[in-house]
Image (spheres, helix red, strand yellow):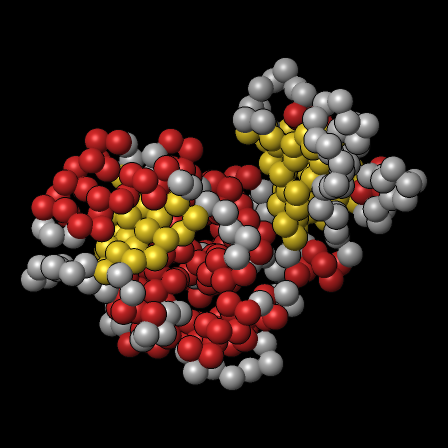
Amino acid sequence: MGRLREAPDVIKLAKDLGLTSEDPAEAILAHCRERVASWVESFKGKLDLPRLHQLIDNKLDVQHIVVQNDAELDNLIAEQTGHGETIFATLKEEFARGTEAITIKLKHAGVGMKRHLAVIDGRGSRATRIYFGKRHEGSHLLCLSPRQLSFVFRRTHASKNVAEEQLIDRISGELAFYSPIFSPWLVRLQCRYGRPCFHLIDDLRMHVCTEASWTATAIAMVEQNESPAIYLTARYASKAGQVSGPGSTSWALRANPRWNRAAKNAGLFIPWNYRIPSSSVIHHTFHSVLGSMDQNADERLGIWTASNGSSLSDLPVRIEARKLSDQVSAIITLR
């Protein structure tokens, strides 16, 4: 969050919301948490994640529409432009330019209709981001100032380099797997296995977040876990700053890790883009002839070495690995 709190667009957003703090990013997060907590507190009945998300959408006066093929997009454009919402005529062009979702304030909302319509592009490879995309659009509305709420539309681009978008991703992640609901289920279900694992991810998706992708659920399972754990994806890449490709001298299977606070406190840490040793089960899984079959092994992180001869802390770990398309996903826990 250090870089986010110094970003001009984040500072401006905090100012527009009337928030004063040395850390504007944390102030915005706190503002959003407090709004949601107040809605949860006043809700009469039992909340699960789908009901929570519906509650938030109702409070924000937003309806989500997912287009899963070209025909659905054409029908939506025809329907809304027929109602006088002419801005919908730009949807095809917006999505073709890399926009993943767009939220439009309707000019002619009928009786019983929501004031905002969030259109999520769920076609092709974007289908895996539908669940998160809904929360992302809602998160933007959650932290917009009254002046910004008067805007006709806003878009979410596939590129998330803008600081404000990164902050919105943080908010979206918290809402997608709202801790007061998700964490109790996590603790209860993990008792079956004793540690974070692939079966636990499947159970969480079955009982708690049926619409969420496997990867998003895996990350939430690790981030909210009290046990030290790393969720890691591995694919072939070169060192940062070098030409990428099989001809590169640094071309190797490399790690993209996400660790939790417990892992950091325990010294369980793998740097980003670190080379994965050929003796690791992660490497074996990537090149395995067994296809998508899961593999697991007990290893020591001391076998992970850098090109300068240094190595990771020699911790005993349990690794579970699965091949998914052109990468391997792995859960790493302490033994």
Is 118 on the left or on the right of 142, as rendered? left
Task: Identify whether 37 is placed above or below 57.
Answer: below
Q: Is residue 125 in view?
A: yes
Identify the residue at horizontal 39%, vertical 62% (top origin).
Answer: 139
The residue most toward the left is 111
Relative image position of residue 176 (x, y in whole percent):
42, 56
Q: State which quadrant residue 70 falls in.
A: top left
88 vs 205, left or right, is left
x, y percent for residue 172: 44, 58
Residue 85's place in the image compared with 139, above or below, is above
Front residue of 249/173: it is 249
Residue at the image point whose x is 72% and y is 59% from the top: 264
Coordinates of residue 251 in the picture (x, y in percent): 75, 29
From the top left corner, tell me how far across and down residue 263 is, in percent. Answer: 70, 56
Q: In the depicted view, which residue is nearer to us: 272 or 176?
A: 272
Is residue 62 visible in the rendered image? The answer is no
What residue is at 44 percent from the left and 66 percent from the top? 180
